[in-house]
Amino acid sequence: MAKEKGITPQSVDFNEWYNEVVLRADLVDYGPVRGTMVIRPYGYAIWENLQRELDRLFKETGHQNAYFPLFIPISFLQKEAQHVEGFAPELAVVTQAGGEALEEPLAVRPTSETIIGYMWAKWIRTYRDLPQLLNQWNSVVRWELRTKPFLRTTEFLWQEGHTAHATREEAEEEARRMAGIYARVLREWCAIPGWEGLKTESEKFAGAVYTLSYEAMMRDGKALQSCTSHYLGQNFARAFDIQFQDKDQQNKYVHTTSWGFSTRVIGAIVMTHGDDRGLILPPRLAPIQVVVVPIYRGETRERVLSAAEALVRELKGSGIRVHLDDRDQYSPGYKFNEWELKGVPLRLELGPRDVEEGTVVLASRLGGKETLRQEGLAERLKERLEQFQQDLYRRALEFREAHTWTVDSYGEFRERVERGFVRAFHCGDADCEKQIKTETTATTRCIPFDEPEAEGFCIRCGRPSAYGKRVLFAKAY
């Protein structure tokens, strides 16, 4: 099958399709250091829209933004045994600076639980200092062996929330609350359906008591962990001696949480919605929601352009993110293809006859064209954009449901997991889980909250299920 508009079809090579789309749609480019990426303005605008909504929701729930150092003494990471073991293979370490060997090596921030724990030990003295509700927008470094733009890079952007509480109940409620905020943004803004659930012991965050995640299905049937929220218990509090005097005059260790949402979600948006023509962006996040392409020849140019500019002013005034493509050096057909590649939800075509008749041709990135009157156009476009957002979510949900199976035999498990997600019982044994991964490359994604209670026997070894419900398995990025 030949490439359509020069893009490798998803059915031929999904990975190559993805790499071509994120580069050609001007989302990202490769940095000069292996595994790094340069997020281009079009891609960064998507992140800014996500950041704006998340930041609003964080502040509504009482969180404040702060910033902690990029460099962390290596001894800090060594204070929490599971934490250092989990991150050791990915650490970038500075051993020399200012022309001299450092007395203590410094880790380039892989995550900030340790540095924040160190500061909390200074700041928290009594119950009056709790809760601590902090968030920071930053970058982290994890030295990945295999990299892919947005999904797995040496350095990436994210937010990491960190909170400290007087009781376990408060901390667990916080971890669940933030997981819920992430799920809301993923569904309502990114139009990505997913499963909310608990990670197994083997898949949880290093140093956590447990981890909550949102698992989404990409259009190749693989899973992408789209965010995580962790209840850390008192693990880091004990490691850094974060104690407070409670109302009963007793010294107690705090309970902490952490939670993160990163630029890998941009990759999730690409792989959940894109097609063989390129990106399809959710209107709520699209840097450009509507592109206006004027169509003219010779003497009609000035009249059509003037009408297009007036139309753009009107749409901007109504709050629509609109762009006028008035480049003379490219044909209308070239422009149509480019904006389809970039995933702009709606395109308006305006020619001489449209100017005369007070109409405009509307083309949707999800398919179909219609002619609309220019009077009241802004409100109609807002309706179309909202419908587009809903249709995009429904389209992704239908794909997910069509590629998810409930299985009870290992043979069917191995067959189905090649093409999507499977629900199956599992014994909970880490060695059995590891064997499944070795034999199929599939992993447990989560124990879904909305999965009905049921009893059964492990899909691989036949022992009784450990979770009282089926577990979600898939191959994953």
Image: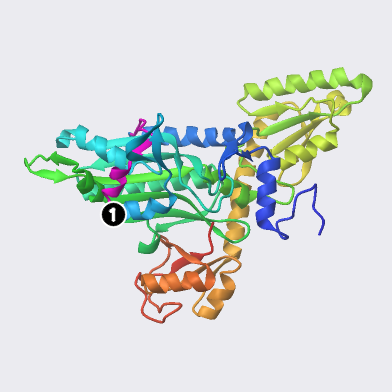
Residue 130 visible, this angle: no
What x and y, as percent, mark residue 456? 40, 78
The residue at the point 37 percent across, 55 percent down is: 86
Quarter of the image with the N terminus is bottom right
What x and y, as percent, mark residue 64? 34, 31
Quarter-wise, where is residue 396 in the image? bottom right
Q: Is residue 367 left or right of residue 143?
A: right
In this view, the residue farthest toward the bottom is 462
What x and y, as percent, mark residue 385? 64, 38
Eyeballing the image, is 400 above or below 147? below
Q: Is residue 126 left or right of residue 433?
A: left
Quarter of the image with the C terminus is bottom right
Q: Over which residues does the magenta segment extend?
A: 63-81
In this view, the residue farthest toward the right is 298
What x and y, as percent, mark residue 103? 30, 37
Magenta-drawn stretch contains 73? yes
* SS at mark 1 in the image: helix
Eyeballing the image, is 154 above or below 65? below
Tell me which amino acid carries mark 1. Ala
The residue wearing badge 1 is 81
